[in-house]
Amino acid sequence: MRRVVFNQKGGVGKSSITCNLAAISAARGKRTLVVDLDPQGNSTHYLLGKAAGELKDTVADMLEQTVAFTVFNRRPDEFVHATPFDNLFVMPSSPELDFLERKLEAKHKIYKLREALKKLGESFDAIYIDTAPALNFYTRSALIAAQRCLIPFDCDDFSRQALYNILNEIRDLQEDHNEDLVVEGIVANQFQPRASLPKRLVLELMEEGLPVLPVRLSSSVKMKESHQSRQPLIHMAPKHALTRQYVDLFGVLHGEAVELEPLAD
């Protein structure tokens, strides 16, 4: 399964959601790949730590060869790196993505990522794609390459307005480029269960018929500690409440029965 985590708004937890779901997948024995398409490289640094600054053979290198004059292109798996965690791999980001974007657009290489990930799907059970906070060439490539899309939502009114735009953009892309793409759900992130506004916003989205997932990810300093230690929650704090929420979210996405707390009393 190829799954993209996408939102045009920054700071909504795309990298955290991508890496933590992928880490749970890997911990369950699935051979799992994270593809980092954000030039900032947050997922790359999260999963590789200091080693991220010394990497060669990145996702930018893989894409660049599609516009270079080469006789033989290297295989996509040659740009995949192991992480310190069993079964978890990453195709790392690079700042070079910024410089490469215009060249890829000019050469109409929007489907090259899908071709590469389909090939990698032969050796990986799950592929998670992290994206930049923008609707650019790379996020469109990711949405074209993916089968499922998760949309993080950070429970404020500005995010709500942006959410409608995102869903419209995805709908257009489905019609023109990827009719098999399914919006798997909206993930309420940094949720504060004792505050009235987040609960009201989530309830209103559900009443509008939007696909809000039943698991809400709490706001917690534990996530910042996880970033600092370069360890996904399932490894750093397996019994923490936020880790449990991620495990429940993973379960919901895979059709497992999970016990969920009601949104309203």
Image (tube, rainbow, N blue to C red):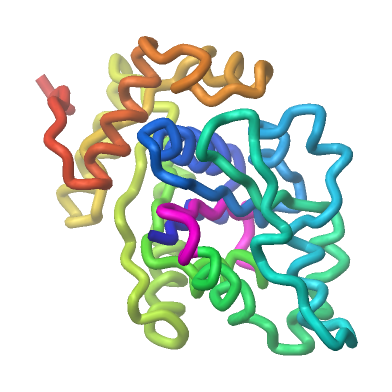
Q: Is residue 81 left or right of residue 184?
A: right
Residue range corresponding to the magenta coloring:
121-136
Residue sitting at x 63%, y 47%:
90
| Residue 17 or residue 91, whichever sits in front | 91
Residue sitting at x 77%, y 89%:
107
In the picture, residue 67 is in which quadrant? bottom right
| Residue 193 or residue 234, whichever sits in front | 234
Q: Is residue 87 left or right of residue 211?
A: right
How far from the left and from the top, in percent, is residue 214? 21, 38
Q: Is residue 100 left or right of residue 156?
A: right
How far from the left and from the top, in percent, is residue 76? 66, 66
Residue sitting at x 45%, y 64%:
165
Query: Is 194 rendered above or below residue 161?
Result: above
How far from the left and from the top, in percent, is residue 45? 72, 35
Whether residue 161 is visible to the viewer of this picture, yes or no, is no
| Residue 250 or residue 157, whichever sits in front | 250
| Residue 237 or residue 108, whichever sits in front | 237
In the picture, residue 174 is in which quadrant? bottom left
Q: Is residue 140 part of the magenta span, yes or no?
A: no
Q: Is residue 125 part of the magenta span, yes or no?
A: yes
Query: Is 98 rendered above or below residue 160?
Result: below
